Image (cartoon, rainbow, N blue to C red):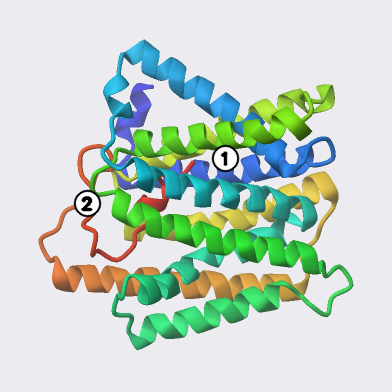
């Protein structure tokens, strides 16, 4: 792998981020493929079991048990409750909607974070970002294609709930990032998901369907690959340079949707997706400008050794800690 050392750091970081987004989309595709055999809570359970097993084996192999230590157990609990509800909603949304439609609505979470930060964190949001919020939410509504023949009101509502819970998780991570290691946050999130969905499994769950064995295994592994790649990418490039690459999820979603289900997104979905991407790009740009103005000497933050200040504008690196 010595050839990797010859790749410029920015190019290397971009490759990692694109691969990370690919694996996120692959995970959601796996959840959609599993939906005929298992409901969303069962998929969360089996996905969590795979991820938890891999993380535990890594911790045992490296003797790195200190990562389990935390002084914020109740914050982890709140984040885990909201996060696991969000994952269920995401998987349910993908089961009900075409890949491109669900992805577009859920990607509006980047816009919703700005709105929630202004409401709950009392952050100052200027006219540029307020305008981006309005246009992003309009893009989300356009992408639902309410007057189209394939409009699914239940699936649309589920995707919007998934979008809001994803945004709330980002608010949690904003405060947790100052003291908590990424592995710690993810471990307790996955553990809480396995325990809570495990209770459901005792009374309502089913053993893995043989037709879904490999899909469920791949779904769990894809979630871990995505986390590790995204975390690694931020060691080599700034957030503002990498964040726009998350919208490659739309490309992968269209490709997977066509490949497995023959879905072709409508003009309304593509138009809404364009507005959502543009709105998020404006927010990233304005936060980058804000950071340069207020922290001219700040250096890129490493997810491993550093943490963001609680009053910094929300960065994609915070969301990178989410499984």
Residue at the farthest left position: 297
Would you say 39 lies left or right of 137 here? right
Query: Which sits in the foreground, 257 or 218?
Result: 218
Image: 304 above or below 172: above
Percent coordinates x, y for residue 287 in the rendering: 31, 70
The residue singled out by tag 2 in the image is 300
Q: Label 2, label 1: how many angstroms apart (C-alpha)?
A: 25 Å
Task: Please give the name of the residue rendered at 41% of the width and 18% of the height, measured from the top-left corner.
Answer: 58
Residue at the farthest right position: 149
Looking at the image, tell me whether mark 2 or mark 1 is earlier in sequence order: 1
Query: Which sits in the foreground, 248 or 71?
Result: 71
Q: Quadrant of the N terminus?
A: top left
Q: Residues within 10 Å of mark 1 (few under 14, many from 20)?
A: many
| Disc 2 to disc 1: CB gap under 8 Å | no
Would you say 39 lies left or right of 280 here? right
Percent coordinates x, y for residue 269 in the rendering: 71, 71
Residue 79 is tagged as none
On the question of residue 238 being in view, the answer is no
On the question of residue 212 being in view, the answer is yes
The residue singled out by tag 1 in the image is 23
Task: Please give the name of the residue rendered at 78% of the width and 70% of the height, measured from the top-left corner.
Answer: 266
Task: Please give the name of the residue rendered at 48% of the width and 79% of the height, measured from the top-left corner.
Answer: 133
Task: Please give the name of the residue rendered at 64% of the width and 41% of the height, measured from the top-left corner.
Answer: 26
Q: Residues within 10 Å of mark 2 (few under 14, many from 20)?
A: few
Q: Secondary structure at mark 2?
A: loop
Query: Which sits in the foreground, 244 or 105?
Result: 105
Percent coordinates x, y for residue 104 in the rendering: 63, 64
Count of numbered tags? 2
Percent coordinates x, y for residue 55 in the rendering: 45, 24
Q: Secondary structure at mark 1?
A: helix
């Amino acid at each position: 792998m010595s050839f990797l050392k010859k790749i410029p750091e920015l190019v290397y970081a971009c490759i990692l981020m694109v691969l990370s987004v690919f694996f996120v989309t692959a995970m959601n595709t796996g959840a959609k493929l599993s939906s005929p055999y298992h409901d969303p809570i069962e998929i969360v359970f089996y996905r969590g079991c795979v991820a938890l097993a891999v993380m535990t084996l890594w911790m045992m192999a490296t003797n790195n048990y200190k990562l389990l230590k935390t002084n914020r157990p109740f914050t982890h609990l709140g984040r885990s409750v909201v996060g696991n509800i969000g994952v269920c909603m995401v998987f349910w949304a993908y089961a009900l909607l075409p890949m491109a439609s669900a992805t577009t609505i859920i990607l509006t979470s980047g816009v919703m974070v700005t709105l929630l930060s202004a409401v709950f964190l009392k952050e100052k949001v200027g006219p540029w970002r307020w305008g981006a919020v309005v246009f992003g939410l309009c893009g989300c509504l356009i992408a639902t294609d309410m007057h189209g023949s394939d409009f699914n009101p239940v699936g649309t509502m589920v995707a919007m709930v998934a979008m809001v819970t994803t945004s709330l998780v980002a608010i949690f991570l904003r405060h947790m990032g100052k003291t908590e290691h990424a592995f710690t946050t993810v471990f307790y999130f996955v553990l809480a998901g396995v325990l809570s969905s495990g209770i459901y499994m005792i009374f309502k769950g089913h053993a893995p369907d043989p037709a879904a064995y490999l899909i469920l295994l791949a779904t769990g592994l894809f979630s871990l690959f995505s986390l590790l790649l995204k975390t690694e990418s931020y060691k080599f490039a700034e957030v503002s340079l990498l964040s726009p690459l998350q919208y490659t999820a739309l490309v992968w979603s269209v490709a997977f949707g066509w490949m497995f289900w023959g879905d072709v997104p409508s003009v309304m979905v593509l138009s809404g997706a364009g507005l959502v991407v543009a709105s998020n790009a404006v927010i990233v740009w304005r936060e980058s400008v804000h950071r340069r103005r207020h922290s001219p000497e700040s250096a890129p933050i490493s997810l491993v050794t550093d943490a963001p200040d609680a009053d910094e504008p929300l960065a994609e690196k915070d969301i990178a800690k989410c499984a």
